[in-house]
Amino acid sequence: MMDAIVAGQPGGPEVLELADAGRPAPGPGQLLIKVAAAGVNFIDTYKRSGTYKVEFPFTPGSEASGTVEEVGEGVEDFAAGSRVATAEGSECYAGYIVLDAAKALPVPDGVDDLTAAALPLQGMTAHYLINSSFRVEPGHTVLTHAGAGGVGLLLIQLLKERGARVITTVSSDEKEALATEAGADHVLRYAGFPHHVRDLTGGKGVDVVYDGVGRNTFDGSLSCLRTRGALVLFGAASGPVPPFDPQRLNAAGSLTLTRPSLAHFLGNPQERRWRSTEVFDAAAKGSLKVRIGGSYPLAEARQAHEDLEGRRTTGKVLLVP
Ligand code: NDP
């Protein structure tokens, strides 16, 4: 018997409980995976709390790494024993998961199981943000919030590798040190950040802001941009942004606003392979450092959510069955 985390109804972290779960059977085109580690992501908290609608009882988790134990009919790309990971699973806070083989990513030898669970969702997010939501070019100046977070630390490294100048925000000295170590050129606190960003850019503003914080930073982010700059709003760690008047984009200098989601940037097997190969290869050769800031036993999922929502985590948060 293996365990899974189940929430009976929407609510705070306390709704997450450990329950007995069976060992599911893979259907046609699916893999049965013994989970090595499951990734904890902010989206799991939106689903748990009811901000995003899901069916209850609900087992969170769309990210995991592990080893294939059985393959369903028609699966050709994987066999029992293959090491895989995914950013597109469901019910990953569990000892076993069943996954469509098309959504499984092969894990290269140089990437260990914990790193393999830490990288898919936040790594491919950082990848699409800088390549596809807004194409960052060498010489661009970029502001990205929550620089010591899971997405934040990866984003800073990819931006520096691209040749951008990176400004980031954090809430503590410890987080400042991590963002600096990742390569950020300027690490700010949130208080007064628009003013500091204007100063740092000689009054001009940045080319793009990547904002995963949402409600608390959105207005400031808009006011940091250069004429014809872009705001990529990709999350709501502080809560959702209230309704918005598009005329504000005109008044602030013909800005572009987009609100992307990873699912729409993994549109076909080639795109999934492109993003996953680039981030996994970078991790395997050590040019992309993956910080696992917290690793909790599966039974402590509640604590992991409390810490993530309470801003007490850095880098990636994992659950280990
Ligand atoms: P993080 O590890 O970045 O954790 C969130 C961080 O946000 C905190 O550590 C904290 O850093 C900062 N923050 C600022 N204000 C608050 C607040 N009021 N409450 C909680 N945290 C706050 O999480 P992830 O890397 O998992 O995700 C970052 C963002 O990216 C989330 O909004 C998530 O939803 C989004 N996301 C979006 C995707 C997409 O495709 N659209 C895909 C993946 C993630 P500090 O203390 O330094 O401020």
Image (spheres, grey):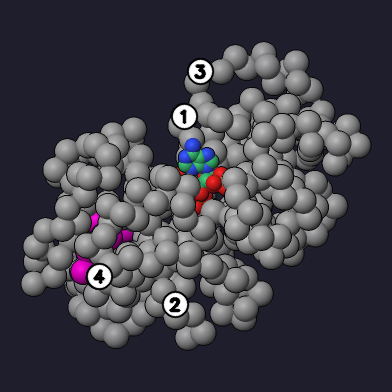
Q: Earlier in the sequence, mark 4 or mark 3?
A: 3
Disc 1 to disc 2, C-alpha distance: 34 Å
Give the numbered dot on residue 109.
none
Q: Earlier in the sequence, mark 2 or mark 4?
A: 2
- Horizontally, residue 16 falls left or right of residue 130, namely left
Kindly indicate the quadrant of the structure image that contains residue 101: bottom left
Where is residue 202? Give x, y as percent: 91, 37
The residue where tag 4 is placed is 321
The residue where tag 1 is placed is 240
The residue where tag 2 is placed is 107
Q: Earlier in the sequence, mark 3 or mark 2?
A: 2
Instruction: Identify which amino acid the numbered label 2 is placed on.
Output: Val
Give the numbered dot on residue 243.
3
- Horizontally, residue 222 falls left or right of residue 103, namely right
- Classify mark 4: residues with Cα within 10 Å, few (<14), some (14-19) or many (20+): many
Task: Choose between 14 and 270: the one closer to the eye.
Answer: 14
Range shown magenta:
89-95
Disc 2 to disc 4, C-alpha distance: 19 Å
